[in-house]
Structures are given as C-alpha cells and as structure tokens.
C-alpha cells in the first residue's frame, strides 16, 4: 500500500527532477552562470515545497473525510435507534458498547439470581414429598398424615405449574438480554472501519514523513521515547497462540507457578 | 471468613461474589480499585483478598506489593483473578507474594480449587 502511494510517486518525480537538475546546475556553475544557477536552486526548492504541501494537504483531507464519513454513516444507517445517531464519535460508541454489555450481564445475572431460589425450593419440596410418598408406598402412613400429604401434593403441583411459568419467563428474558450482541456488533464494525481508515492514512502519513526526512536530511533522536513500564497491565491477550511470552490458559499458569515452587 | 473483592468492573465483582457465595463464603465486600480497597483493608479486618490486576487508580499488582510491605497485611492471603497472562507478570506476582493466580475467563471449579489450595497451605504452616 505504502509503495503505491501518490506521495511516493511525487517524490520519485521530484528525485528525477533533482537528478536532472544536478548536472545542469554543475554546468551553470562551471560556466559562471551564477544567476541561472541560483534560479535553478530556487526552482528545485519550490518543487520540493510544493510536493510536501500537496501530500500533507491530501492526507489531511483524507483523514478529515474518514472522520466526517464516520459521523454521517451511523446516523443514516441506523435511523431506528435514535440513541445511536446522537453519538458522534468513536469514544461514545465504545462506551455505549461497555454500557450495553454491562447491562446485559446484569440483567442475565438478575434473572439467574431470581430463578435459582425457585429451582432450589421446588427441589426441596419434591424431595420432602418423595420421602413421604415412599412411606405411603411402604404403607407406613396414618390416614390423617395421608390427608396432609394429599393436600401438599396438590399445593406442590399448583406451585410447580406457576413457578415453571416464572422460570421459563426468566429464561426468555435471559435470551432477550443477549440482544446486545447484535447492537454492539454493529457499533464495533463501524469503529473498526474508522480505525482501519485512520490506520491506512496514518501509514501514508508516516511514509510521507520518512520521505520528508529523506529530502530534508532530518535525523531523529529516539532517546526520549518513553520506556514501557515494567509489568504494565495489557488486558486480555487476543492472539495468545501466536505469542510465546503469554500463557494460553489456567493449566499453563499452574505449570509456571509450580515450576517456581508454588 | 470476611473477603474483599477488588475489580473495576461491577459485573466481574458480582460473578466472583456469586461464586464465592456458592462455595459458602457469604461475608463478601467490594472495592473498585486498589485505592478504595486499602482503607477498607485497614479498618475491615478482612481474612482474604481477591483482586483483579488491571484497574484505574491503583492496580492489583501495586495493591499486592503495598499489602506485602505492610506488616498488618504481609500474611493476608491474596488471590489474583485477572486477564493478564504474560509469563513475566505471573512470575512478578509470584515474587511479590501472591497466594494464587487465576486467568480470566475462569470457571467455578478453578476458583474453588485455588481457594482450597490456599487454605490448605495456610493450615500446613
């Protein structure tokens, strides 16, 4: 990509001009035609500046376009969700993703917290009834106890019916809470597209900058580059299998720790 | 058993809290980073600390080192539950005196196993 950038072409044209002009310049200087020589130097300089301005302008426009397009896109593509069209930048969108995923996680956990005691209660009641039922089967039950069991079984069946309804309602809510996946997916794809556009433009900009350095002969001092903090947190590793400096799961953590005497 | 759970994401705190409750640990408290955890540790008389690594304010790694440098918390059992998976980080945490290290995503079984192992070791000492 960088090799075919217009910046590269213009620079090589500039280099061609520079090479052509060098012999001409020597000729002029040797023949004592100094004012022509100075004019020639001026022309080379102008051409160099023009190249730089052109390329910087082009990249600025491209960057600006990328950012502007991003803003417009989402509002038009998603008129249904008014909340989304209001969001004008990537940070807001990413925060929106965090919010949606957090809400979904909480809704899901709420429903599980609500359902678990229901299941526990049904299990306990069924267990108690089964014990008494076994006594009935073994004919160990007195008539008044049987009347009580009769009533409890009736209650239990009624409650099971009701609670099963509330459980399946909760399960449905849990399924619905996963709807964030579609919404966050759409938002993330937009952000990824923006990042890609910016990345491409940045690569061109860096390429351009290196050409500027080449033409102007600027050398950079890299010593003031901030050093990475030791053991700085990196967050989840996305490509663990491609890296040797990370573990790929709990088993490897355990192996590593036991090799340290843990 | 009084446990402090430190994580900047409330959902992760809730997951850990629920798993601990299933394991029979009901006395749990929460902090969202090292800076809020420290004053709680100082006054709360906690028996166990479960912490994430990557948090704003003060990371779990700094919290671990701060605890180990403080005579009051140098023996407090600390379990790290984190997405940080670099070998050098795990080694650094071990050298700093962590009692257990769990990488996210993790399972209830792993949490149970690590907590049991930590208490086994403490009893042996």
Image (cartoon, grey):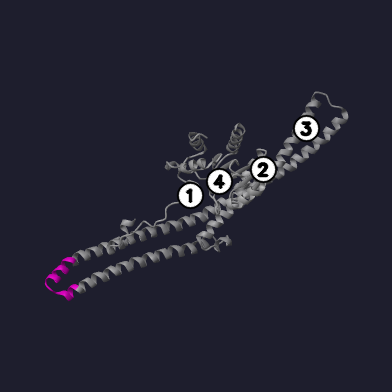
Asked whether disc 2 touches disc 4, contact meaning CB atoms under 8 Å apart, the reply is no
Q: Main secondary structure of the magenta part?
A: helix
Q: Helix or strand or loop: what does disc 4 sit on?
A: helix
Is residue A179 at least partly visible in the picture? Answer: no
Circle on res. A232: 1
Q: Are marks 4 and 1 in contact (CB under 8 Å)?
A: no
Q: Disc 4 sits on a residue from what chain?
A: B
Q: Residue furthest top?
A: A138
Tell whether position A27 is magenta: yes
Range covered by the magenta-colored residues: A22-37
Q: Which quadrant of the rendered structure holds the N terminus of chain A? A: bottom left
Q: Position of residue A143 (x, y in %)?
A: 87, 28
Q: Is residue A26 left or right of residue B109?
A: left
- Viewer-nearest of discs 3 and 2: 2
Quick one: label 1, few (<14), some, or many (20+) residues within 10 Å? few
**Helix, strand, or loop for circle 1?**
loop
Residue A241 image position (x, y, % from top left): 44, 41
Residue sitting at x 78%, y 26%: A134
Asked whether the residues under the numbered discs 4 and 3 touch, taking CB atoms below 8 Å apart as contact, a structural biologist would say no
Q: Compared with residue B25, is residue A7 higher up or lower down, i.e. above or below?
A: below
Q: Position of residue B59 (x, y in %)?
A: 54, 50
Identified at 51% across, 40% down, the residue is B94
Chain containing mark 3 = A
First-in-chain label (2 vs 4): 2
Label 4 packing within 10 angstroms: few (<14), some (14-19), many (20+) = few
Q: Which residue is mark 2?
A: B2
- How many neighbours does mark 2 have within 10 angstroms: few (below 14), some (14-19), or many (20 or more)? some
Q: Nearer the viewer, residue B2 or A153?
A: B2
Q: Which residue is mark 3?
A: A129
- Marks 4 and 1 sit apart, C-alpha to C-alpha, by 20 Å
């Amino acid at each position: 990509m960088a090799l075919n950038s217009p910046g590269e072409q213009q620079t090589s044209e500039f280099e061609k001009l520079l090479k052509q002009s060098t012999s001409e310049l020597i000729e002029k200087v040797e023949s004592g035609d100094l004012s022509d020589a100075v004019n020639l130097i001026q022309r080379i300089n102008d051409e160099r500046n023009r190249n730089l301005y052109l390329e910087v302008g082009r990249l600025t426009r491209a960057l600006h376009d990328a950012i502007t397009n991003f803003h417009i896109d989402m509002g038009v593509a998603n008129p249904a969700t008014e909340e989304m069209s209001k969001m004008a930048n990537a940070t807001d969108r990413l925060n929106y993703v965090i919010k949606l995923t957090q809400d979904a996680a909480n809704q899901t956990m709420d429903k599980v917290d609500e359902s678990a005691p229901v299941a526990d209660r049904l299990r306990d009641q069924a267990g108690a009834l089964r014990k008494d039922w076994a006594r009935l089967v073994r004919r160990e039950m007195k008539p008044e106890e049987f009347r009580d069991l009769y009533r409890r079984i009736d209650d239990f069946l009624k409650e099971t019916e009701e609670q099963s309804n509330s459980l399946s309602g909760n399960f449905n809510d849990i399924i619905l809470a996963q709807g964030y996946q579609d919404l966050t997916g759409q938002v993330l794809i937009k952000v990824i597209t923006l990042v890609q556009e910016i990345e491409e433009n940045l690569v061109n900009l860096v390429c351009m900058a290196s050409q500027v350095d080449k033409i102007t002969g600027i050398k950079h001092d890299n010593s003031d580059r901030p050093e990475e903090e030791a053991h700085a947190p990196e967050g989840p590793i996305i490509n663990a299998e491609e890296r040797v400096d990370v573990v790929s799961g709990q088993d490897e953590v355990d192996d590593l720790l036991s090799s340290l005497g843990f | 058993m009084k446990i402090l759970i430190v994580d900047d994401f409330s959902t992760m705190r809730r997951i850990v809290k629920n798993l601990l409750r299933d394991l029979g640990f009901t006395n749990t408290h929460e902090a969202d980073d090292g800076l809020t955890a420290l004053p709680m540790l100082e006054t709360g008389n906690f028996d166990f600390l479960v912490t994430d690594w990557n948090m704003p304010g003060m990371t779990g790694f700094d919290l671990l080192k701060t605890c180990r440098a403080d005579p009051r918390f140098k023996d407090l059992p600390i379990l790290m539950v984190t997405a940080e998976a670099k070998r050098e980080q795990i080694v650094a945490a071990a050298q700093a005196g962590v009692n257990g290290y769990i990488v996210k995503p993790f399972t209830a079984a792993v949490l149970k196993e690590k907590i049991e192992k930590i208490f086994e070791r403490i009893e042996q000492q």
